[in-house]
Image: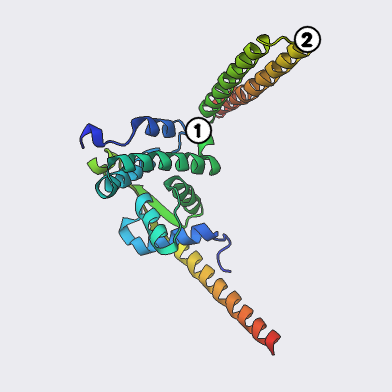
Amino acid sequence: MPENLQPPRFASRILSYFGSPHLPQILGDLMEEFNERVHSHGLSAARRWYWWAILRNMIALAAGGQMFGKSRPKTLFLISGIWFSISLLWVWFSHRWLMGLEHQSWGIVTLMIFLVYVVVVIGWLVPVLWAIIRLRSTRVQA
Amino acid sequence: MGSDRLLGGFEHLLLLAILRLEDDAYGATVRRELIQCANKDVAVGAIYTGLDRLEDKGFVESWVGEPTAKRGGRGKRLYRVTSAGRRALADMDRAIRQLSARLQTEKGSARA
């Protein structure tokens, strides 16, 4: 198949993070339907469908508990990393915005930022600790 | 019911689809069958999750086919209904028929 008729690689890579034992079969089935849709609906419509199908499969795998298979610690690290990055960005932006204002009560602002940091640290640490505990228990069982 | 393991609604549909497809039952064809016959557009991932449950119950068996270029060098996982699966389907059909018949009888006596 020519390179330009391939389904979006990045979309396939996102699904591979979910670590389902059926990943090769799911990607194969999606590719089969992608090929059929290229012929019946055109390349751009097939690519749009592929992205939509990847999103639906991510939800289906998460709902079916397959994202928490053997790759559970890996997935948790990924989720916690995304959560940590978004939260830090939000804190940075909100802090910059507040610094730009002539604010009277700096004590409250500092307290608010401190509280946000506490939430960020808890939100990051809890899944990471969970992942570490699961990794250790998997090794002990092995 | 003869089988001690009950079939869910989605599992029932999956078993029927596999039976209809005979030797060509895998994720994409089962999905197509569900769309055409049951008007259910289900993600392939959800189909494999359901098929895993059926395999754990011993109602289907699976094997991986030869990789093909059309699928990007990936093999199909083909499914077949086992004799336990056929028994579970028959039990389910019998239960539905009996319950429906009783429902109609009760409706009839209520009208009278």
Q: Chain of mark 1?
A: A
Where does residue B87 sit, x and y in percent of width and height?
48, 67
Q: Residue at x 36, y 50 (%)?
A: B28
Q: Residue at x 58, y 62 (%)?
A: B4
Q: Residues within 10 Å of mark 1 (few under 14, many from 20)?
A: some
Q: Residue at x 61, y 19 (%)?
A: A90
Depicted B102 relative to depicted A66: above or below = below
Q: Amino acid at mark 2?
A: Gln
- Comparing B24 with B63, the one in front is B24
Q: Which residue is mark 1?
A: A70
Structural distance between the alpha carbons of marks 1 and 2: 52 Å
Q: Amino acid at mark 1?
A: Lys
Looking at the image, is mark 1 or mark 2 nearer the viewer? 2
- Comparing A105 with B73, the one in front is A105
Check residue B33 in the rendering and tell me which mark sits there, or answer none.
none
Q: Does any portion of residue A10 appear in the rendered image?
A: yes
Marks 1/2 same chain = yes
Depicted A92 relative to depicted B39: above or below = above
Toward the bottom, the furthest residue is B112
- Tag 1, which secondary structure? loop
Q: Which residue is mark 2?
A: A104
Depicted B48 relative to depicted A3: above or below = below
- Tag 2, which secondary structure? loop
Q: Residue at x 57, y 61 (%)?
A: B6
Q: Chain of mark 2?
A: A
Where does residue A110 sit, x and y in percent of width and height?
74, 11
Residue A126 quadrant: top right
